[in-house]
Amino acid sequence: MTTALWILALILPLTIATLIGVTAAPPRPAADASVPAPESPVQRLWLAIAPLTALPAMALTAIPGASLTVPWLLVGTHLHVDGLARPLVLVSALLYAAALAAVAWAGYRGGRGLVAFLLVCHVGTTVVFTAGDTATFYLGYGLMSFAAYGLVVNSRTTEALRAGRVYIVLAVLSEGAVLAALLLITAIGGPLVEDAPRAVAESDHTALIVALLLVGFGVKAGTLPLHVWLPLAHPAAPPAASAVLSGAMVKAGLMGWLRFLPLGEADLPGWGLALVVVALAGAFLAVPAGELQNEPKVVLAYSTISQMGFLAALVGVALSSPELAAAVAPAAVAYAVHHALAKGALFLGVPVWSHHAHGARRWVVAVGLGGAALAVAGAPFSSGSVGKYAAKNAVEGVELGGVDLVDLLPLVATGSTLLLLRAGWLLVRREPDVRPRPDAELGAWLVLVAAGIVVPWVVTERWLPLTAVPSLDPVTLWDATWPVLLGLAIAALAVLLAHRALLPGWARRADGRAVPPGDIVVPEERLARAVGSVSRSAVASVRDLRARADRDLARVIPSAAASRAFDTLESGLTSRAGSGAVVVLFGLVLALAGVVS
């Protein structure tokens, strides 16, 4: 039974993706090339099945410790739904099912390719969370990373292609760093993932491996300064793709850190402190950058960067304090579970608001979006309060520059409140694109909202070994409330200052020009163009020098017979010791001859 579920969870999505591709209808002549050709009946069947392919992965999470071993595949493939993977596999499957339903069942234009790439990404994400050996982990990581390029460039607009270029450059950087780290780890400790942390701790190259892991998985997790793909990819990708990019795929970076960093095995205060500082810098700097945007999905992307900074800070604590690793890992997963579902509901909610925020449905959509936003902010009684309470207990007593980390982390919720208020304001000001009746998009979103309410509580109560969950005592409730109230107060003050024209012009406009989406990617692109220009000039100069040398050589050796004699001499020189020096000397003579002439 378990083996059959594994086969269905991994093979069925890939099979449906392949069938969608091979049964594509031939292109028809059309005056409007932007309108996709209609699906054939066979394609409609595959599209209808696509969301159901996530069910086997969900079923695997109902079997504690479900595993699969295939000795003949790669270097021996091992998959295992352990305590850390189980919650993430469940929420990932829920997200992909909702995204696939919103695309495939709602008649999304251009949805065939999008569905196929979502299916491939789903398999890659599941493999990343469950891989028990390094080769299988890397296979899943690469599959997920490169298939996600198809999600980013789905619309093929200029903005999407630019976002795709930035994404693929960083994806290749991530792949290279992760591959180098995994090769070093495997050479030391063998192929099993469970042996990796000890192998890294005992290695003579611990610092190098940790650096590679932080950079490689930091790209996927959106850690400063490797975050720049997120604010570009989210507005370019369809909302369903954004939901899985922000909800599921960025968690692959977290899982990579939890699997391979020497958490609990080595005391690395320098690396841990560096990660905490960078993570908190990203968490707080994402707030002003996001506030200056004028597109809801860009603001939500910066919100993801901020919250992933929160998670990265937890990993940094575990890296510097091995005794806390056992408490930090499940707390990080609990926070990731709530964030995945709530942020997925927010991204999917962007088109839902445009299509269904009218009549009686308006209030249903407003309540759902408001609940998801409160969860991301960590408001009392929300799923976010569970993750943040667990994180607070896990890092209690840890200080950063003399400041207790427990006093700093709640301020991330204040930033989240500000960003979500900005996203909500931009959303309600958008021009609606009303749909007359409920559809699969609305249904998939409602299921995801309901899952965001129920699943985090069930997972943290039954699946994760947390030290505590939030109670209803006044102190706990106030700890969850004051960061949100502080965010509301700051927002009210900003509105008052704007009303009285006391804000600078760039802050009043907040149109994405003061800090463009991707922020530091803009000067990075300029630098890349400058380097490219210099490189092209250098290549052109080398070609000119070569052409000049050829002309000089032709003057020195004008006849064909002399040329053949020169070739014979060159062949003889290359076969003798010291001939390299002779060739260099001869080249200098030729150059001198050219100068003199």
Image (spheres, helix red, strand yellow):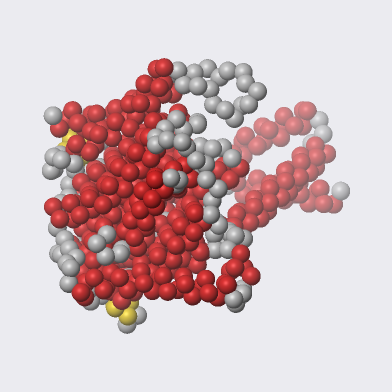
Q: Residue 520: x percent and y percent?
A: 55, 61
Q: Quadrant of residue 474?
A: bottom left
- Residue 504 versus residue 326 in the image, above or below: below
Q: Residue 348: x percent and y percent?
A: 41, 45
Q: Residue 151: x percent and y percent?
A: 46, 39
Q: Answer left or right for 502 relative to 312.
A: right
On the question of residue 177 being in view, the answer is no
On the question of residue 546 being in view, the answer is yes
Q: Answer left or right for 28 relative to 478.
A: right
477 or 114, nearer to the observer? 477
Residue drawn at 42 percent across, 32 percent down: 106
Residue drawn at 49 percent across, 54 percent down: 428
- Residue 38 versus residue 372 in the image, above or below: above
Q: Residue 485: x percent and y percent?
A: 36, 72
Q: Answer left or right for 588 relative to 465.
A: right
Residue drawn at 35 percent across, 63 percent down: 377
